[in-house]
Amino acid sequence: MSDQRPMAGRVAMITGASSGIGEAAAHAFADEGAAVVLVARRGERLRALVRKIEDSGGRALAVEGDVTDSGRMREAVEAAVEAYGRLDHAFNNAGYASAGLPLHEIDDDVFRRTMDVNVTGVWNCMRHQIPVMLGQDSGGSIVNTASVAATRATGASAAYVAAKHAVLGMTRAAAADYGTAGIRVNALVVGATRTEMMEEVLAQDAGLEQRFADDSVQKRMAAPSEVAAAALWLCGDGASYVTGAAMPVDGGATAV
């Protein structure tokens, strides 16, 4: 009997996959039948995640690497094609955030790391993912993780706000570049989400958690699975006429 799940026969690359939104997305895509290529720096956690997915009957491949390394991202895409023959979807989700200090107090190293991971990382992934998708009759779909900080100053650091604005700009430009080639490119405008990275930020300021919750009209933070579900939908056939979009997954934070 053939697999009738929506993502059966498809291949999805997910970065930042060792925890948080990326880990939730790995499970979500695999549960819908996709083979998942999981990329992150923490190799042991990736391999443990692969074992969980395989134990549940899914297909998964771990590629240890940093999105700031263009060569490694090329190798990750090549590994996906070598293992599964194609690349249909990409969820470029790896990110980095730091405490929301005033601009003049942000160290140069923090600024560079913020831009390298959030901006250069997405650039590195798309520039290697897109040529593969261009070579497929079916094209492909890409989702990049942006943030409410891509739309306004949120209290996050100026470096993070600038980086997420850049992600949104790249997303729109790529959507325009490849719209007639069958490649859709969208971004998630993500609100405060309870990930490990967020927990590290919250630990630096006891008042941040309530402030983040209050920013949402639902008065709560998101679960990683809620963001992963949005990425899954944007990659799927139900979003076939959606490209260049900045899709809010923010509990209404950008609505008011």
Image (spheres, helix red, strand yellow):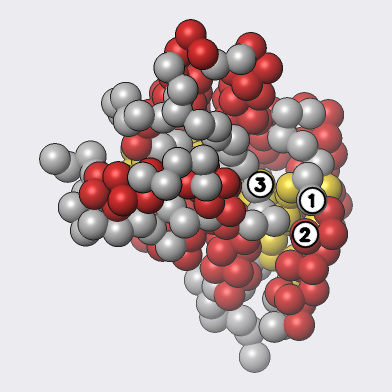
Extreme-front residue of the structure: 206
Q: Would you say the residues marked 1 and 2 are in contact, meaning their CB atoms lie under 8 Å apart? A: yes
Give me the residue at 63% from left, 21% from top. 110
In this rendering, is residue 108 above or below 30?
above
Q: Is residue 223 visible from the viewing direction of this image?
A: yes
Are there few (<14), some (14-19), or many (20+) residues within 10 Å of tag 3? many
Quadrant location of the C terminus?
Answer: top left
Horizontal side of residue 250 vs 86, given as left or right: left
Q: Quadrant of residue 52?
A: bottom right
Q: CA distance from mark 2 to mark 3?
A: 11 Å
User: What is the number of the mark on residue 15?
Assistant: 3
Q: Would you say the residues marked 2 and 3 are in contact, meaning their CB atoms lie under 8 Å apart? A: no
| Amino acid residing under circle 1 | Arg
Q: Quadrant of residue 28?
A: bottom right
User: What is the number of the mark on residue 42?
Assistant: 1
Which is closer to the viewer, label 2 or label 3?
Answer: 2
| Amino acid residing under circle 3 | Thr
- Front residue of 216 and 82: 216
User: What is the number of the mark on residue 46?
Assistant: 2
